Amino acid sequence: MFTGIIKDVGRVRGVTRRQGGLRLRVQYNNTKEFSNLSVDESVSINGACQTVVALGEGWFEVDTIEETLSKTTLGALHNGALVNLERALRPLDRLGGHFVLGHVDCAAPVKEIKELGSSRELWIAFPDDFSSMIVSAGSITIDGISLTVAKLEAQLFAVAIIPFTFAHTTINELKQGSQVNLEFDILGKYVARQLGRASSFGREEAKPEARTASRINEAWLQENGF
């Protein structure tokens, strides 16, 4: 699990194709943060959870399989590409962002980047299948970065980028048409799942345990802080 607070911007130093997958070598700069990195540890690369399979002084390697390549932008990485890095959350770490699993839902295009004085507004399109998992002022992960949905329209949302985030992540590399990795909030996914189950109970005979779950509705969500 991760928090979406980027700890370093690394650089791809090797891309090797292996039986439909990729072996990626990533160079990191923050030696204090990554000095005790070990094989089998999880690292978020542009929001995708990957397992370290080899490492050396200032670098580590991961194997990216077909499933990951089909849902993320990792397959488009090339030598020299910059990537956002975060190590897995430790139990005593501060949770500065939100709960991020590193399980990317989809890749999506940047539609517009607006300059707003000291900040920027980043507009991104998303598939309609995920409409129930995103809310205004809710959390979303873009290329591994924990951000807040500032504006929401049909299949389009915007996030506000403060100067620090712009300077210390790969956000400053994005332009109109760039593809980014999206992970929708895991809490929203479970709520959407439960609501979907509840709505189906009226269309078919429910089991005893299902009738209990059907109490989840909009009033219940408001009462419980959603």
Image (tube, helix red, strand yellow):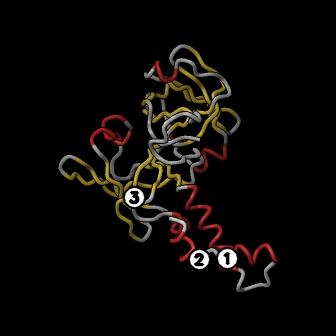
Which residue is tagged 2? 217
Which residue is tagged 3? 149
Local SS, label 2: loop
The image shows residue 11 at horizontal and vertical percentages of 45, 27
Q: Nearer the viewer, residue 1 or 172?
A: 1
The image shows residue 28 at horizontal and vertical percentages of 47, 23
Tell me which residue sits at (38%, 52%) in the image: 177
The image shows residue 83 at horizontal and vertical percentages of 45, 34
Name the kind of residue labelled 2 in the image: Asn
Tell me which residue sits at (47%, 49%) in the image: 141
Quadrant occupied by the N terminus:
top right
State the mark number for residue 198: 1
State the mark number for residue 222: none
The image shows residue 142 at horizontal and vertical percentages of 45, 48
Q: Residue furthest left?
A: 117
Q: How many marks?
A: 3
- Which quadrant of the figure has residue 221? bottom right
Q: Earlier in the sequence, mark 3 or mark 2?
A: 3
Tell me which residue sits at (30%, 38%) in the image: 164
Q: Earlier in the sequence, mark 1 or mark 3?
A: 3
- The residue carrying pointer 2 sits among few (fewer than 14), some (14 to 19) or many (20 or more) residues within 10 Å by Cα, namely some
Q: Are marks 1 and 2 in contact (CB under 8 Å)?
A: yes
Viewer-nearest of discs 3 and 2: 2
Whole-Å distance between the Cαs marked 3 and 2?
Answer: 23 Å
Q: Nearer the viewer, residue 102 or 23?
A: 102
